[in-house]
Image (cartoon, rainbow, N blue to C red):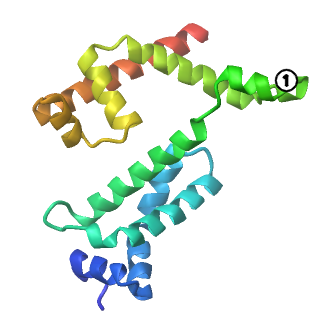
Amino acid sequence: MPNNEPDYRLMRRVALGEEDAVAELYDRYCALVFKLSLQFLSNNAEAEDAVQEVFVRLWKTADRFDPRKAKLVTWVMLITRRHLIDRIRRKTVRPKQQEFTEHHEVSATDTPLPSNTLLHERNALLWQALQTLPEMQRTVIERAYFHGFTLREVSKQLDAPLGTVKSALSRGLLRLREHSSKEISAQL
C-alpha cells in the first residue's frame, strides 16, 4: 500500500495485525510520540520505553479509531498523552508515611537523592501555586493535566462552553508561569 493511504484503512490493517501497517504507523508517528514522551519524562530511556508502550496500546485499540471524530494524528497524540499521564501517576504513587515507617526501618542510606528532593520541592511549590488560582482555572488544570480529560470532556463535566474552558486553562497556565518566575527570582 502507498505511504499516503487513508488513515482509516491503515488503522483497519493495524487492527488486523498486519505487520507492514504497524510499521507504517510507527514510521509516521514515532518521532512525534518520542518528542512528547521526552517532554513528559526525565530521560531518553524512559521516553523510548513509553514510545514502545504507546504503540502497543495503539495496536490494541486500533479498531476504536473513528476518522469521523478525529484525525489520526490527533488520536495518536491523545493516546500518547493519556499513556504518559498514567505512567507518571504510577511513578508518583507512594505508600503513606505511616505505612512506610511501620514496615521499614529508616536509615541514613534511605535519604532521597538531591534530584528527587528538588523535584519534590518543585512539585510542592507548583501545588501551592495551583491552590492560589481561581476555582475554574484550578479545576480545568487539574482535570486536564492530572486526570487526563480532554478539554471537551472538562467542558461537559463543568457544563461550561468549550471556549470558556480553553480560556480558563490558558489564563491558569499563564498565572502558574508568572508565579514560578517570581519564585525563581526570589531564590536568586
Locate the N terminus by quadrant: bottom left
Quadrant occupied by the C terminus: top right
Q: Residue at x 41, y 72 (%)?
A: 59
Provide residue 97's location: percent of width, then percent of height: 68, 21
Left or right side of 1 for 129? right
The answer to whether residue 123 of the structure is visible from this angle is: yes
- Whether residue 181 is visible: no
Q: Residue at x 44, y 86 (%)?
A: 19
Give the class, few, some or many, for how many residues have Cα within 10 Å of label 1's Cα (few <14, many ≥20).
Answer: few
Q: Determine the residue located farthest toward the top in the rendered image.
A: 186
Three-letter amino acid code at disc 1? Answer: Val
Taking the view exactly as shown, the residue that stands out farthest to the left is 161
Q: Residue 16: name its quadrant.
A: bottom left
Residue 81 place in picture, x, y as percent? 40, 50
Q: Residue 30 location in percent, x, y?
A: 45, 67
| Residue denoted by label 1 | 106
Picture layout, residue 60 above or below residue 128: below
* Residue 183 in the figure: left or right of residue 116: left
Query: Which of 24 and 82 lies nearest the eye of the viewer?
Result: 82
Q: Going by the image, does 132 lie left or right of 2?
A: right
Between 111 and 166, the one lying in front of the other is 111
Which residue is painted at 28% across and 28% down in the image? Answer: 140
Residue at the far right in the pictured view: 108
Q: Quadrant of residue 154?
A: top left
Residue 80 location (% of width, % of height)? 41, 55
Q: Residue at x 51, y 40 (%)?
A: 89
The one nearer the camera, 78 or 102, is: 102
Say which element carries label 1. Answer: loop
Task: Give whichever of 23, 12 is nearer the camera.
Answer: 12
Label total for image: 1
Residue 20's place in the image compared with 109, above or below, is: below
